[in-house]
Amino acid sequence: MDGSWARWLDRWTAAGVIDADTAVRIRAFEASHAGSGRLRWPILIALGFGALMICGGILLFVAANWDALSPGQRFALVLLLVASFHVAGALSAERFAPMSEALHAIGTAVLGAGIALAGQVFNLDEHWPGGIMLWAFGAGIAWVLLRHTTQLVLTAVLVPAWLVSEWIVATEGPRYSDLREVVPAAGVFLLALAYLGARGRDSRSHARRALTWLGAAGLIVSAPVLVDATWAHLLAPRQWAFSGTRDVVGLAIAFGAPLILAAALRRIEAWPCLLAALWVAVLCLLHANSRDALPFLWWAVGSVGLVAWGVRDGRPERVNLGALFFASTAIAFYFSHVIDKLGRSASLVGLGVLFLGGGWALERVRRRLVEQSREAA
């Protein structure tokens, strides 16, 4: 149990689920074992960095000696690297489960390098997204068999990477599409929201927690990409020209796949993701010029919606992200519409007032909303 176990214990005692003597024994047990879990995060961090260093070292070693190896030696080396780490992970599963998970993760990461190297050996570079598809397929199999959180994270990253790469290849060259940038940007943004909403009020799953962190990181990265993709449309307003079935399929996957995933994770509680999809669709269809404040207003509405979603589900991370996006929108609006209308000194003073006054007010509201979300949880 996490740090909120004492509150739940008081609640169960007050409701008569457990008696007072049992509650006292539980508190004594937790107090005697309070220090046992403090080394968990340092150990996990050490294992994570160790796995990254091993992967990097192996890739550097293979790259440095690749030209000196024959095709047979190259393929044997690839098989050896992939198999050895999974075997080592299986052997250490009973003795040290975190080490086993790290070794299996290294094996899956090396699988991607092995697929790329095998494709180079046999000159199979005609359709490079196929390599990412095989890598994602291998990570998915590893997650189904092992149920490790690391394998789930790798799968959650590689599957959208494969879809985006397929779209890039399908729309390059003479097959260019007006939706080339918008489709992957919208799809990744909505998928990050689906990941972010994986946890509800009572969720304690490590897998859902990992998806939440992945969604938060993906949202921070994909939001500027979505701004850039849609802003090009705002600067040059035009009607989207659909290029047949390809663009329709791309839009269906970009908007439909995240909604299906959100429904699978949260069922009926995933309805905010549907509203988010409608919000992204309206953002893509906005026809405005660079001096119009409507896009900034729409981003502010989306930020408030993310905060409201966090308060409703008792998730402080959504409140914090919503506050971050709202502040970023206000700063972007100031630089785009206000600063050029003022002198240099007045613009600096205004920027200072915005940071000091706006930051103070936003922080007060954020803290109050975070507290409400924690009470709701």
Image (cartoon, helix red, strand yellow):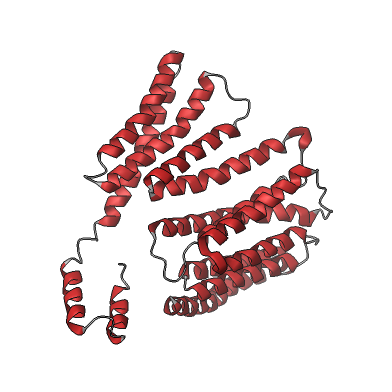
Screen quadrant of the C terminus:
bottom left
Q: Is residue 320 visible?
A: yes
Vertical arrangement, residue 336 with respect to residue 174, above or below: below
Q: Residue 367 location in percent, x, y? A: 47, 77
Question: What is the quadrant of residue 287 in the picture?
Answer: bottom right
In the image: residue 94, left or right of residue 152: left
Query: Foreground: 306 or 289?
Result: 306
Vertical arrangement, residue 303 with respect to residue 208, above or below: below
Question: What is the quadrant of residue 226 in the picture?
Answer: bottom right
Vertical arrangement, residue 93 with respect to residue 332, above or below: above
Query: Foreground: 297 or 130?
Result: 130
Q: Residue 49 location in percent, x, y? A: 34, 44
In the image: residue 42, left or right of residue 159: left
In the image: residue 8, left or right of residue 200: left
Q: Residue 80 location in percent, x, y? A: 36, 25
Q: Which residue is at a point 46% across and 45% down the rendered structure image?
A: 154
Query: Foreground: 56 or 363?
Result: 56
Q: Which residue is at a point 68% across and 65% down the rendered structure image?
A: 279
Q: Residue 23 location in percent, x, y? A: 21, 79
Q: Which residue is at a point 55% across and 32% down the rendered structure image?
A: 131
Q: Residue furthest front?
A: 17
Q: Is residue 182 visible?
A: no
Q: Which residue is at a point 67% across and 35% down the rendered structure image?
A: 169
